[in-house]
Image: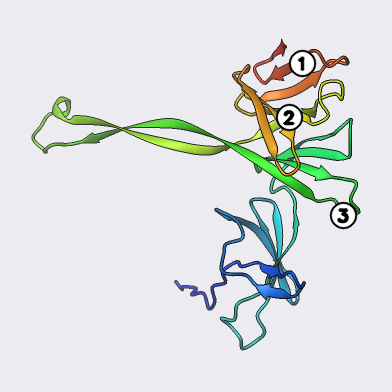
Amino acid sequence: DFMLDPIQEVKIIPTQKKKNNKKSVGDLKAIAPNVYIVGMTRAETHWIIQDRNGTIWRMDVPPPGKIGVPSNIVQIMNVHGGKIRAVDASPSDHYVATTSDDGTIKCWDVSSPSPSALFSRSFTRRYRQENDIKKSQGEEKKENDEDDEEEITTVETICKATTLMWAPGVVSEKALLVGFENGVIRVLVRESNRWRMTNVSKPHWGAVSCVQFSSQGNRVVSCGSEDNCLWF
């Protein structure tokens, strides 16, 4: 048996830019809340790191003999951190909406030479999980005399989107219809820097497999994994 002891611990601190375009080391703030690294690969002078939020980072490898020196970390790009579930281009302008297993719904400006996500949004769901815990009050007590206590835990998980579609221009030039794995359908409206939710409903018991507008835009059909289709 043997033990591996780390010789260095590096806190992920992104290199930021000041107004005069000179680089400066960040102020010890984490790159994102609840950051979770899912993969990394080594090059000659740096590491390439991917986090669960879909961000790709470049971290410099400390020079030999300078273990413990903080490494510069620069964000290269921000993409999805999981399998892409749906992509749809707006029929009215140059925006594209995407969603993946990382739970985010992103809006991209594809008119730029280097397309990047303008903003994203994710949703969570909470449910109560009940656990039965038996506590014995003594070895001589019978089983039916033991106290049964019920422990309730609130669990919060990411709610993944499974399908999406932009509304026709006759309905709205900014509305996006999004279906989720828990049967929920949300209407999101693209604003300058965020998705704004305007409507939410839960017509399906299982995951929403597709949503579709009619050609006139006055009807919507949604299908679920429970093998049914609903018209609105």
Q: Which residue is mark 3?
A: 114
The quadrant of the rendering that contains the C terminus is top right
Residue type indicated by callout 2: Thr
Classify residue 202 as left or right of residue 106.
left
**Mark 3 element type:** loop
Q: Which residue is mark 1?
A: 220
- Residue 14 placement: quadrant: bottom right
Image quadrant containing the N terminus: bottom left
Res 154 quadrant in image: top left
User: 210 or 197, which lies in front?
Assistant: 197
Where disc 1 sits, the SS reads strand
Tell me which residue sits at (86%, 21%) in the image.
170
Residue 81 higher or lower than 171, as above or below: below
Q: Is residue 10 left or right of residue 153?
A: right
| Outermost residue to the top | 231
The numbered disc on residue 163 is 2
Q: Nearer the viewer, mark 3 or mark 2?
A: 3
Q: In the image, what residue occupies the spot 89% across and 31% down?
A: 92
Above or below 162: residue 4: below
Q: Position of residue 227 (x, y in %)?
A: 68, 15
Q: Earlier in the sequence, mark 2 or mark 1?
A: 2
Identify the amino acid type marked 1: Val
Q: Nearer the viewer, residue 179 or 173?
A: 173
Contact check, label 1 and label 3, Cβ < 8 Å = no
